[in-house]
């Protein structure tokens, strides 16, 4: 991960001002996760709010995803939390087939196996209707990507990630991360559940509109720290659904 200097509105590279700190005395992943996510959310929000006076710069959805993910990864490495809580970015083929952009996981010692997982899919207000597997220009498709696209053609991107989480079990949570909403385009929200699969079969289509309905009637949101705390403390086989505000 090279540190390429990129300036937006006169501001330096998204990684340049990250400060290295020493290894924590006691590894508590909840505040470390909160710190990493807070920095990633804040940095991404700068780009959500940015308005080019010349009306030439419009960060793409892929760029926003990359800003969040790479800022989070850089910070989590600095905090030396990756042995207890890691982040795995999906390949293009995996994004198409599984519907996830990345997966967070609580690591079990000493086996290093994932104990709890959170599969993340980023959504944007400009996306409109679910675009299925066609999130990449056709000219960049490899043979493997095309095979994955054909395999998943009859399911929405949301359905693919829900099925992926369901195949692992209730210890795998689906988190739909909204980089802005129609009535609040400058903030980041999330909807998390380990029980979305219960809607499959009862709902004709699970897409972005279906996920957005979870915000209806929500007057308060939990923090990312409270989200992770609830996931870790969840009793076995207990369903968990919540809405989160990241900024």
Image: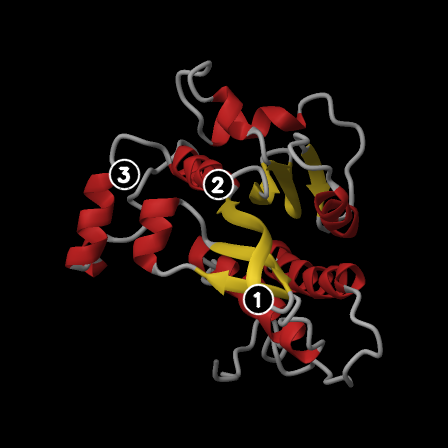
Tag of residue 152: 3
Contact flag, marks 2 and 1 (Cβ < 8 Å): no
Mark 1 = which residue?
111
* Front position among marks 2 and 1: 1
**Gap in angstroms between the C-alphas marked 2 and 1:** 21 Å
Q: Residue drawn at (67%, 22%), measured in percent from left and top?
A: 216
Which comes before the other along the chain, label 2 or label 3? 3
Q: Tell me if residue 199 can be seen.
A: yes
Q: Residue drawn at (44%, 29%), measured in percent from left and top?
A: 207
Q: Is residue 89 left or right of residue 146?
A: right
Could you tell me residue 91's position as x and y percent? 36, 61
Mark 2 = which residue?
165
Does 32 sit above or below residue 233?
below
Query: In the rendered view, how is the structure colored?
Result: secondary structure
Could you tell me residue 46's position as x and y percent? 65, 61
* Front position among marks 3 and 1: 1
SS of the residue at dot 3?
loop
**Gap in angstroms between the C-alphas marked 2 and 3:** 15 Å
């Amino acid at each position: 991960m090279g540190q390429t200097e990129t300036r937006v509105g006169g501001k330096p590279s998204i990684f340049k001002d990250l400060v290295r700190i020493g290894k924590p005395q006691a590894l508590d992943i909840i505040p470390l996760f909160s710190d990493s996510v807070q920095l990633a959310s804040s940095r991404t929000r700068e780009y959500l709010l940015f308005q080019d006076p010349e009306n030439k710069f419009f960060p793409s959805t892929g760029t926003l995803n990359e800003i969040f993910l790479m800022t989070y990864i850089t910070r989590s490495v600095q905090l030396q939390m990756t042995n207890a809580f890691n982040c795995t970015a999906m390949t293009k083929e995996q994004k198409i087939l599984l519907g996830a952009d990345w997966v967070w996981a609580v690591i079990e010692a000493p086996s290093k196996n994932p104990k709890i997982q959170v599969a993340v899919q980023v959504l944007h207000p400009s996306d409109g209707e679910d675009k299925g597997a066609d999130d990449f220009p056709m000219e960049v498709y490899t043979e493997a990507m095309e095979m994955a696209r054909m395999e998943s053609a009859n399911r929405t991107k949301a359905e693919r990630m829900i099925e992926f989480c369901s195949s692992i079990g209730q210890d795998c949570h689906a988190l739909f991360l909204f980089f802005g909403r129609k009535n609040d385009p400058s903030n980041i929200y999330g909807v998390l559940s380990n029980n979305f699969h219960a809607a499959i079969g009862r709902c004709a289509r699970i897409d972005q509109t279906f996920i957005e309905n979870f915000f209806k009637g929500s007057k308060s949101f939990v923090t990312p720290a409270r989200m992770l705390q609830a996931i870790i403390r969840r009793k076995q086989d207990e369903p968990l659904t919540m809405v989160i505000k990241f900024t």
